[in-house]
Amino acid sequence: MTYKDRKARSDVAGAATALRSAARGRGRAARPDAAAARSAPPLAATAASRPYDFREQIGHLLRRAYQRHVAIFQQNAADAQLTAVQFVTLCTLRERGPSSQSELVRATAVDQGTIRGIIERLTARRLVAITTDGDDRRKVIVHLTARGSAMIDRMVPSAHHITELTMGDLAPVERVALVHLLRKMTGDTAGP
């Protein structure tokens, strides 16, 4: 295990401890025991007794964070014509090699209709090329072109900078905790 791996693991452990401490500080145990869980009022009753402030809801906060990230991406990308989701698609093709549309949908978490439009735009810019599968002529295979690979190389320094700007003033332990929690929420516990 490298120093970087040990440091990241230590930061995650520290973040988890901080989150548990914060939860205890609000008068709640980090992990309620079974007796406490059984005696807790039903979720509907507790939710109905609290006022609803959309500004405190996870969906609203995630949407605002995503909008902020997209704006930062558009302002700082090495290629002003490339969107964040197009960049993710190019990176996926470099990582996985030639892929079908359905494989790209699964790998990028982009819906079928959107990935079709992304492929069309990337094809028009000659960043990807399309062929048909030898066994199934209905199946479209998307390939990264040399031009697409060069675009990724140009974008990677910008992408690192965009991540830094998106994370803003978060402390290193907060950054690790945020990425860990987002992966956990999306079911991607394995990471890269």
Image: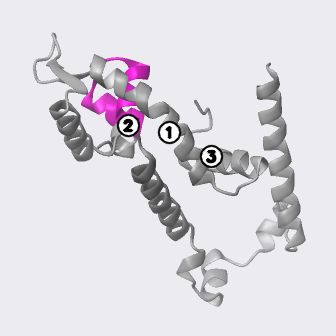
Q: Is residue 48 above or below residue 40?
A: below
Residue that appears at 84% across and 68% down: 36
* Disc 1 to disc 2: CB gap under 8 Å: yes
Callout 2 amino acid: Phe
Residue 92 in the image: state x and y as whole percent. 40, 28
Q: Is residue 146 above or below residue 51?
A: above
Instruction: Tell me, yes or no, if residue 167 can be seen here.
Output: yes
Residue 104 in the image: state x and y as whole percent. 33, 32
Image-based side of 113 in relation to 166, left or right: left
Dot 1 lies on which element? helix
**Range of residues picked out in magenta:** 88-108
Callout 3 amino acid: Lys
Image-based side of 156 in relation to 79, left or right: right
In the rendered view of the protein, which quadrant contains the C terminus?
top right
Give the CA separation, mark 3 to mark 2. 23 Å
Give me the disc on residue 34. none
Give the CA separation, mark 1 to mark 3. 23 Å
- State the residue position of label 2: 87
**Closer to us: mark 1 or mark 2?**
1
Q: Which one is earlier in the sequence, the residue at label 3 or at label 2? A: 2
Q: Alpha-carbon neighbours of circle 2 within 10 Å: few (<14), some, or many (≥20)?
A: many
**Closer to us: mark 3 or mark 2?**
2
Residue that appears at 24% across and 40% down: 118
- State the residue position of label 3: 184
In the foreground, 128 or 151: 151
Image-based side of 42 in relation to 66, left or right: right
